[in-house]
Amino acid sequence: MQSIISISQLSKTYESGFKALSDINLDIRRGEIFALLGPNGAGKTTLISIICGIVTPSSGTVIADGHDIQTDYRAARSKIGLVPQELTTEVFETVQATVTYSRGLFGKPRDDAKVEAVMKDLSLFDKKDDKIVTLSGGMKRRVMIAKALVHEPEILFLDEPTAGVDVELRRGMWEVVRGLREAGVTVILTTHYIGEAEEMADRVGVISKGEIILVEDTSELMRKLGKKQLTLILQEPLDAIPDSLVAYGLDRSEDGTELVYTYDTQAERTGITRLLADLSAAEIRFRDLQTEQSSLEDIFVSLVSDKR
Ligand SMILES: Nc1ncnc2c1ncn2[C@@H]1O[C@H](COP(=O)(O)OP(=O)(O)OP(=O)(O)O)[C@@H](O)[C@H]1O
Ligand SMILES: [Mg+2]
């Protein structure tokens, strides 16, 4: 698939000397929802800010819809809508005035029908004459999205769109994002919530300490999520795994008292019945067993902690 954003060898060292991004290479596909997942301070906002021209990179390039964000800034920026992590807007203005003004900022001609359509899409039309200060947090965030969309960008960045938003509004936000994708907008969102990435994104990129450590189709991550582990606590420690059990790919704990079998819950056969029969044949007895689901959360935590 054609990429709409192409990031190569991008690094950022802040003036303080802190290296926030190192050698980022990432392509965003046209029309996808991409979730950038990472802990606090990983570099998500820095990366987005560079693409949006708010922060200058130390090295590397970013091409957005065919335009270099440094040498061809205005053209690149006109393709991009940004909903920043921190909500900043003119609180005493009305919704309609704020959204209308944002369109003008990008040099687009006034278009009341477009402003109306964007407000309607975000269920803000009823509130169009309300002052922003009177809106709830979730509604304010919708105003920010309206502001980011009113100049008709191809690419929308949502930096933590659902932080501090309740479950219902979060679902509402997801609906909005899905609607945008249907309209052909490429959406890149950042999140701390693995569940949100899972629910929303076509692909997930995990960022940790300024490095992209994994980019994968969400469905592939879900497949990994389908893995379960069966731990057998043995009556007698085992020095080595007998040949008759090698095919199961068991992990033996250091002290030999536990065997761990990893299997796919979505497979037709888990292999557990045969494993237990073969254990019995090898005269290995266990006194207890437990199963554990390896969740995306575990995968994420282990990926991120490996980098520490
Ligand atoms: N202007 C700056 N000067 C120096 N360091 C900065 C600056 N802005 C950010 N940083 C540092 O760069 C790192 C990455 O920050 P960034 O805001 O990109 O993280 P983030 O992934 O968006 O985190 P969060 O999930 O908390 O929003 C952090 O350690 C932060 O302290
Ligand atoms: Mg951030």
Image: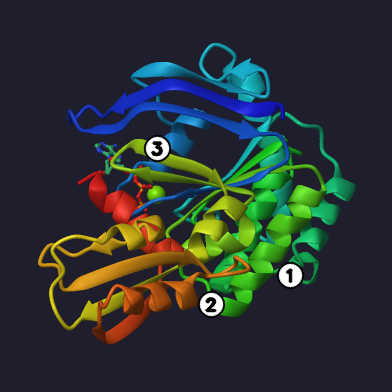
Which residue occupies the extreme right position in the image? 113
- Number of other residues with Cα within 10 Å of mark 2, as a class: few under 14, some 14 to 19, many 20 or more: few
CA separation, marks 2 and 1?
20 Å
Q: Which residue is mark 2?
A: 166
| Closer to the eye: label 3 or 2 | 3
Q: Is residue 17 left or right of residue 80?
A: left
Q: Earlier in the sequence, mark 3 or mark 2?
A: 2
Kindly identify the amino acid type of the residue bearing the numbered disc 1.
Lys
Name the residue nearer the viewer: 18 or 202. Answer: 202
CA separation, marks 1 and 3?
40 Å
Q: Which residue is mark 1?
A: 127
Q: What residue lies at 21% left-to-right and 72% top-to-bottom?
A: 258
Query: Do the numbered discs 2 and 1 sit on residues whose CB atoms are within 8 Å?
Result: no
Which residue occupies the extreme top position in the image? 71
Q: Earlier in the sequence, mark 1 or mark 3?
A: 1
**Residue 212 bears which disc, if any?**
3
Name the residue nearer the viewer: 128 or 148. Answer: 148
| 245 over 286 or under it: above or below | above
| 180 over 252 or under it: above or below | above
